[in-house]
Amino acid sequence: MFGTRKLGKTSSQRKALLRQQVTDLLQYGKLETTFTRAKEVQPIVEKMITLGKKGGLANYRRALSYITKEDVANKLFKEVAPGYAQRNGGYTRVTRTGPRRGDAAEMAVIELV
């Protein structure tokens, strides 16, 4: 069950952080962040890709209400989601990359498969 980690932030800060990271991951295809943040972003991105696979105006508006950039939502529905048409889930991969130099936080790379 996702959404249970507080990530040391208030609920509004946490929501803004996750929205931005989902947008960046869909825009660039890859994102380097801490492992716990990557595990929180993963199911949200999977749901956005599922909305893109379903298509339709209602699903586009649902995705656009979460994604912060309209061109990223267009990219999701026109390029990213059709690439996963034959795949049933598992659109992202989280790979641990080791501790961060400053505070030894466990870092990870989350990417679209």
Image (cartoon, grey):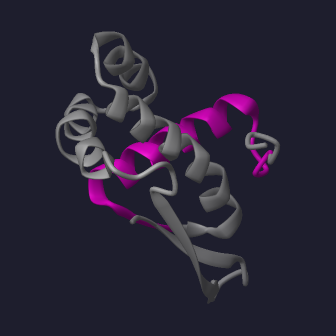
At a point 55% along the width and 67% down the height, the residue shown is 33
Displayed quadrant of residue 52: top left
Q: Specify start and end residues of the magenta stretch as a single range.
A: 6-32
Residue with the most extreme top position: 58
**Main SS of the magenta segment?**
helix
Q: Is residue 22 above or below residue 66?
A: below
At a point 63% along the width and 68% down the height, the residue shown is 34
At a point 25% along the width and 51% down the height, the residue shown is 83
- Does the stretch in magenta take in 15? yes
Residue 79 falls left or right of residue 10: left
| Residue 27 spot, x, y in % from top left | 28, 50
Check the picture and name the quadrant holding the N terminus.
top right
Residue with the most extreme front position: 86
Residue 10 falls left or right of residue 91: right
Seen from the viewer's position, the closer of residues 66 and 47 is: 47
Seen from the viewer's position, the closer of residues 1 and 35 is: 1
At a point 58% along the width and 50% down the height, the residue shown is 41
Residue 108 falls left or right of residue 2: left
Residue 36 falls left or right of residue 73: right
Q: Is residue 50 above or below residue 26?
A: above
Check the picture and name the quadrant holding the C terminus.
bottom left
Displayed quadrant of residue 96: bottom right
| Residue 16 spot, x, y in % from top left | 55, 35
- Does the stretch in magenta take in 102? no
Q: Is residue 25 above or below residue 58?
A: below
Q: How many marks?
A: 0
Seen from the viewer's position, the closer of residues 58 and 109 is: 58
Seen from the viewer's position, the closer of residues 5 and 2 is: 2
| Residue 93 spot, x, y in % from top left | 51, 67
Q: Is residue 104 visible?
A: yes
Q: Is residue 68 visible?
A: no
| Residue 86 spot, x, y in % from top left | 34, 50
